[in-house]
Amino acid sequence: MRTLSAVPGVILVVLSAVACGNNARPGSADALCAASYEPRELVDSGPLYPPLPGAAEGTRGESRSTDAAAIKKVAAAACALPEPPSDLACTADMGPSYRLRFVDTRGRATTLTAGDFGCRFVEGLGTPRFDAKPLWAALAAAGLPAPHDR
């Protein structure tokens, strides 16, 4: 019977542990959520509506802000949103969403999509977040379009 060398087996176990334990978020999301984040611009597109059969894409507006302090508050609100629990139940309705494009002083961009329906999921931070109401409040405080609290 042939035996395997212990070295390749140990290397395989170490590499498997590293790969399985790596839950790092994408680089741009890390930059957005870092305390050292230096914003240059925030582009808020929305509300965006899912296209209806036979109709063009829904209404779309776009607003921009270069107010670094306001953008930092919006980024902090997005990064502070909770991750959904495994047993979260949401309605199956559809509605508008907003696209937020953050650009930092180094030219790195992070784009988030925030839904204003169901559990109000926010995508683009590595793992989905939910309950975007604090994000809406930060956008409104920055003078950018945001859904009305329902």
Image: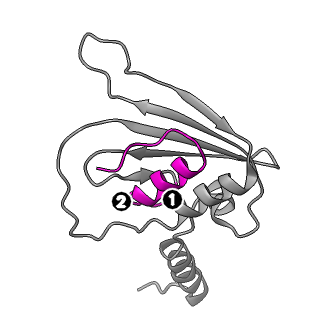
**Image check: 92 left or right of 122?**
left
Crowd class of label 2 (few under 14; some 14 to 19; many from 20; radius 10 Å): many
Q: Are marks 1 and 2 in contact (CB under 8 Å)?
A: no
Q: Amino acid at mark 2?
A: Asp
On residue 36, which mark appears? none
Could you say whether the residue bearing mark 1 is in a helix, strand or loop? loop
Residue 128 appears in the picture as rendered = no
Quarter residue 25 falls in: bottom right
Q: Which residue is mark 1?
A: 126
Identify the residue at the far right of this view: 106
Instruction: Report the magenta residues as a range.
Output: 125-150
Could you say which is closer to the camera, residue 144 or residue 55? 144
**Image check: 124 left or right of 56?**
right
Q: Residue 91 at what x, y percent from top left?
A: 17, 50
| Label 1 or label 2, whichever comes before in sequence order | 1
On residue 131, which mark appears? 2
Between the residue at mark 1 and the residue at mark 2, the CA separation in whole angstroms equals 16 Å
